[in-house]
């Protein structure tokens, strides 16, 4: 390796900097994995709340139904808002897409209920 007149750091410093960047990259990858987990759980929460809303409607508790539907819609919107932060595998992406479609369909079905 020859010395460049433009070099401002020593090779040892550059190696340490490369190690730091690699560690930061590993943390970023782990964080993206946490986003995937969070979004899948948010989808499951939204789906559960649509089912709770359906149960409330069938039991005549309309206000409770609308409250639960609101929670489910917030879960849906959260997933849409933060999806770009995740880096899912192909399998995870397929699962997320399936759950997202299911949640969207259930929300649409709940939208058919009339307000009082």
Image: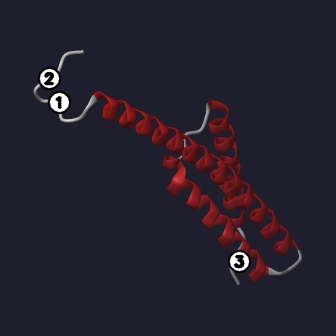
The quadrant the N terminus occupies is top left
Q: Counting residues from the N terminus, which is met first, the one under dot 3 or under dot 1?
A: 1
Give the foreground label among 2 and 3: 2
Mark 1 crowdedness (10 Å alpha carbons): few <14, some 14-19, many ≥20: few
Please tell me whether residue 2 is drawn above or below residue 79 in the rendered image: above
Instruction: Give SS at disc 3.
Output: helix
The residue that label 1 is drawn on is 7
The quadrant the C terminus occupies is bottom right
Question: In the image, 25: left or right of 17?
Answer: right
Q: Decide: marks 2, 1 in contact (CB < 8 A)?
A: yes
Instruction: Give SS at disc 1.
Output: loop
Give me the C-alpha separation between circle 3 and circle 1. 63 Å
Pick the front one: 22 or 87: 22
| Residue 15 point in image, percent of width and height | 37, 30
Please tell me whether residue 15 is drawn above or below residue 43 in the rendered image: above
The residue that label 2 is drawn on is 4
Which corner quadrant of the image does residue 46 belong to?
Answer: bottom right
The residue that label 3 is drawn on is 67
Toward the right, the furthest residue is 59
Please tell me whether residue 68 is drawn above or below residue 94 in the rendered image: below
Pick the front one: 18 or 94: 18
Name the residue located 66 percent from the left edge and 49 percent from the top edge. Answer: 37
Give me the C-alpha separation between circle 2 and circle 1. 5 Å
Pick the front one: 40 or 47: 40
Name the residue located 63 percent from the left edge and 62 percent from the top edge. Answer: 75
Which corner quadrant of the image does residue 90 belong to?
Answer: top right
């Amino acid at each position: 390796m020859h010395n460049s007149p433009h070099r401002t750091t020593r090779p040892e410093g550059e190696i340490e900097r490369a190690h730091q960047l690699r560690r930061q990259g590993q943390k970023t990858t782990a964080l993206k994995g946490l986003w995937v987990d969070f979004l899948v759980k948010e989808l499951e929460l939204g789906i559960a709340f649509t089912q709770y809303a359906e149960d409330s409607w069938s039991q005549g508790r309309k206000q409770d139904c609308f409250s639960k539907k609101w929670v489910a819609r917030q879960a849906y919107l959260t997933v849409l808002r933060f999806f770009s932060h995740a880096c899912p595998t192909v399998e995870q992406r397929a699962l997320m897409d399936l759950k997202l479609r299911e949640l969207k369909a259930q929300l649409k079905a709940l939208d058919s209920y009339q307000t009082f």
